[in-house]
Amino acid sequence: RKAEALAKRSADDLRSPICCILGHVDTGKTKLLDCIRRTNVQEGEAGGITQQIGATYFPRENIIERTKDVRTKVEMKVPGLLVIDTPGHESFTNLRSRGSGLCDIAILVVDIMHGLEPQTIESLNLLKMRHTPFVVALNKVDRLYSWKSCPNAPITNAFEKQSRDVMNEFDRRLNQIITQIKEQGLNSELYYKNPDRRKYVSIVPTSAISGEGVPDLLMLLVTLTQQMMESKLMYISEVQCTVLEVKVVEGLGTTIDVILVNGVLHEGDQIVVCGMQGPIVTTIRALLTPHPMKEIRVKGQYLHHKELKAAQGIKLTAQGLEHAIAGTQLHVVGPDDDLEDIKEEAMEDMKNVMSRVDKSGEGVCVQASTLGSLEALLEFLKSPAVKIPVSGISIGPVHKRDVMRASVMLERKKKEYATILAFDVKVTPEAKDLAEELGVRIFTADIIYHLFDQFTAYMDNVKEEKRKESADEAVFPCVLRIKPEFVFNKKDPIIVGVDVIEGIARVGTPICVPSQEMIDIGRIASMEVNHKVVDTAKKGQAVAMKITGTTPEEIQKMYGRHFDHQDELVSHITRRSIDVLKENFRDELSVEEWKLVVKLKKLFNIP
Ligand code: GDP
């Protein structure tokens, strides 16, 4: 059926490319969408732009009208452009459709006054990971000092109206940004100077306020998609459809918002969707699009359809969608299809993600809004620079049951893993309360890096606290030799000058004299190096040291009777002290110092 569908497709029957907008907060994504969406109301026509579920549809006629003054002409073969409405939402850029990105093309918005910002870089990485082609909208050009406004003009026309100074300033900023993009491993160039669109990212200067460059942007989106992915855009009868969001709507129950990328959906179609508890097999009860006059908030906001053709944003209702997972594929069961095969195919996405969970069962829980964003988060946590183990995953809001699952870690050795990293999802109040009660940490963020920063800061804190708690138990290894000419007090307390022969002498370290029966003489109470009080002294340093007995036996020990300068003094280590050292101070000891630990271990006959 698939082969048949593919054979029938042709360049004369293209679907609309799907586009999404992303970039750092406040770069103007929303404004740019508004600006693109603006219709020529003065001329008394709506321009055919239609509001869909989760997307806005721009028909061919509208784009032709808007781009008529752009110098580079293009023949429009696609029926229109479908722009995903939720800007800046990595989860949406990251939605997949049959292996590749749901979005055929993306607009990465960069504020010309700010250049590349953290979220811009994160977006860039996501686009690279998904191999999604994109253009850079270099927005807010109207903020260049003494910019002359040329509403809705193609950018080259607007540039001709600007003074030398404005253009110099523009060039300076453009070049900086080209360099920054280069630092991310990509070549870029102004779109009308681009020598090779497959090798250079095109930059379109825009203003979302006065509309300069917006015609160029529209034209470029059409040109690029037509040039670079004609075969991907050919209309086929096989359904290709991605779940955007799972929503409960009053009067409708649980609905799913989908983007129908290719093919046709009918009322009554049998469908299979990936669910948290396995494949969901159900039947489309209603295919809905928003009512054109949605300002009038009447009951029944939605138009019902018998069938809808790609590309479109659609809301659909069916039984049993509660556990559907956003970001997965919707499959239609055809008359010749084997339902079991399709069920397996539907769960494929989930399987891939599940395989990334740590087998040891120890690690944090992660939760995201869609399968795509969960994957991106897992990918990030796994990377060598981060390496945070994951024990559980979930999609959608954080509920009580998720907190319960994370709380299992409290009984393990690594309590700090009793943590939920929640990416771009809500936490229910009940879950929040329960987490507080049980001691489960929940970190939430809309940017992956922020989650990571929060978690690492937390881990550093935990480490520091553990260190403080165990400081008394940790014994640093050292070997000392007494200098007979510097014996100031022979007992109670012992005050002597010593050389640190090996390791680290640290205040609090229990000291003993290795002989047949290992004579404990007390703990290091204080130290001075060159008349300065110190907490630690390293190999090679000469130290004045006070050793105080902590038991009646130790207090009795005396220089000259129980030991003298011919004896070496060493740290008294134990199995427990080694474990504490390993767990909390691993990085503070050099390889040589760890070797000393091993040497002392033998001396003390510790297995
Ligand atoms: P988003 O967070 O990326 O969606 O950014 P918004 O669209 O909300 O814009 C952030 C702010 O920048 C708002 O105050 C906008 O009015 C302003 N803004 C957006 N685009 C432009 C532009 O092209 N020129 C100027 N001067 N301001 C802009």
Image (cartoon, grey):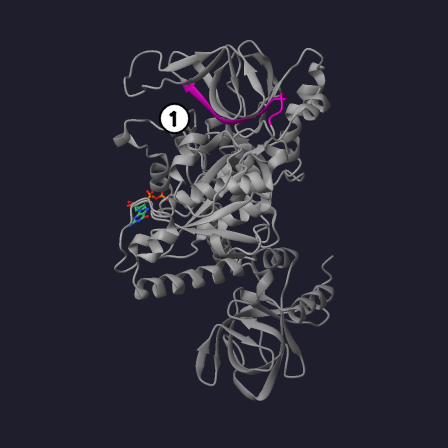
Residue at x 53% of width, y 35% of height = 406
Instruction: Say whether residue 243 is magenta.
Output: yes
**From what the image shows, is residue 373 above or below residue 255?**
below
Task: Pinpoint residue 275: horizontal percent, then vertical percent.
Answer: 58, 22
Magenta-drawn stretch, dominant element (helix, strand or loop): strand
Q: How many labels does the image show?
A: 1
* Range of magenta residues: 235-248
Label 1: element kind: loop
Residue closest to the eye, 230 or 54:
230
Given the current orientation, which residue lies at the most extreme bottom position?
A: 485
Task: Pinpoint residue 158: horizontal percent, then vertical percent.
Answer: 33, 53
**From what the image shows, is residue 207 above or below residue 62?**
below
Q: In this view, does 272 lie to the left or right of 532?
A: right
Q: How many residues crowd mark 1 within 10 Å: few (<14), some (14–19), many (20+)?
A: some
Residue closest to the eye, 502 or 84:
84
Residue 455 can be seen, yes or no: no
Quadrant of res 239: top right
Residue closest to the eye, 129 or 279:
129
Residue closest to the eye, 176 or 328:
176
Residue at x 56% of width, y 73% of height = 505
Task: Pinpoint residue 176: horizontal percent, then vertical percent.
Answer: 44, 63
Q: Name the residue under label 1.
A: 48
Residue 272 can be seen, yes or no: yes
**From what the image shows, is residue 273 above or below residue 166?**
above
